[in-house]
Image (spheres, grey):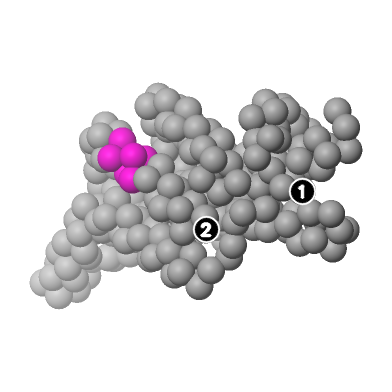
Amino acid sequence: MDFGDLSVFLMVFARIAAFAAVFPLFALTNIPVQVRVGFGFVLALAVTPVVAHTAAVPGTTLGYTLDLAGEILIGLGVGYTAGILFHALRIAGQFIGLQIGFAAAELLDFSGTQNTILAELMFFTGVIVFFALNAHHAVLAALVRSFELIPLTGGAVKASSALIIARFVNGMFATALQLSAPILAVMVVVDVSLGILVRMVPQINVFMLGFPLKITTGLILLACLLPVMGVVLEKVFERMVADVFILVRGLA
């Protein structure tokens, strides 16, 4: 490998490593850094021979540094866009946990994490569906295809790209609300019913009654919705891959 090939390899590795740094499945704290670096190294070795003949490596150190930074930004954008659904699942779990009373577990959580139990449950449910649908193949294919749509040194950060990412973030919260809406709606009905009950029978300790009732009802509903959620997530994962290509074309 001559100096030119090494320069191309480093740019390819920068884009892939940046992707792995923010994609939720690689960003888990229990995944060693060596695994992420190894993934980027192996994939970069496979991609470099394909793109080496089309890459125009800058002749100056400043130009190369700027292009390297551009590859990192592209990788970060692709990784974040590809992982938006996983963030939406965690937010949906936070919504549900807050409504049924699991948010109190955060006050007693000494692990240092900010996610509730249901947020992690929703996240890992999404992970299972992600691999069951072979969506990881589509995401990796989209990452590799990005080198075709955005050749090395050929990308540009545009104002339209920021608008695209802002639209994706807005869609992330909308997806989280859609996933949690059935349980949130039932919890509102439970709250209203408890309010009516306490007005009719003031002697009832509504807190002692409502706390276990809301948790039990919420968990039963969640158990009933998990099988259906797989069908919904399949459509959302397809949209997620399409969103990656929309971003890549916006950066091209």
User: Is 235 within the magenta?
Assistant: yes
Q: Which residue position is annotated with label 2? A: 251
Q: Main secondary structure of the magenta part?
A: helix
Quadrant of the image occupied by residue 231: top left
Q: Earlier in the sequence, mark 1 or mark 2?
A: 1
User: Is residue 227 or residue 150 the one in the foreground?
Assistant: 150
Q: Which residue is mark 1?
A: 57
Relative image position of residue 182 (x, y in whole percent): 21, 52
In this rendering, is residue 38 above or below 58?
above
Rendering coords of residue 9 (x, y %): 77, 37
The magenta segment: 234-240
Q: Position of residue 226 (x, y in %)?
A: 30, 36
Q: Nearer the viewer, residue 98 or 146?
A: 146
Q: Is residue 178 left or right of residue 122?
A: left
Residue 78 in the image: above or below residue 232: below
Residues at marks 1 and 2 touching, judged by CB atoms closer than 8 Å: no
Horizontal side of residue 224 vs 129, given as left or right: left
* Residue 52 included in the magenta stretch of the image: no
Camera-near label (1 vs 2) is 1
User: How far apart are the two marked residues, 1 and 2, measured between alpha carbons?
Assistant: 19 Å
At label 2, counting other C-alpha atoms closer than 10 Å, the crowd grade (few under 14, some 14-19, many 20 or more) is: many
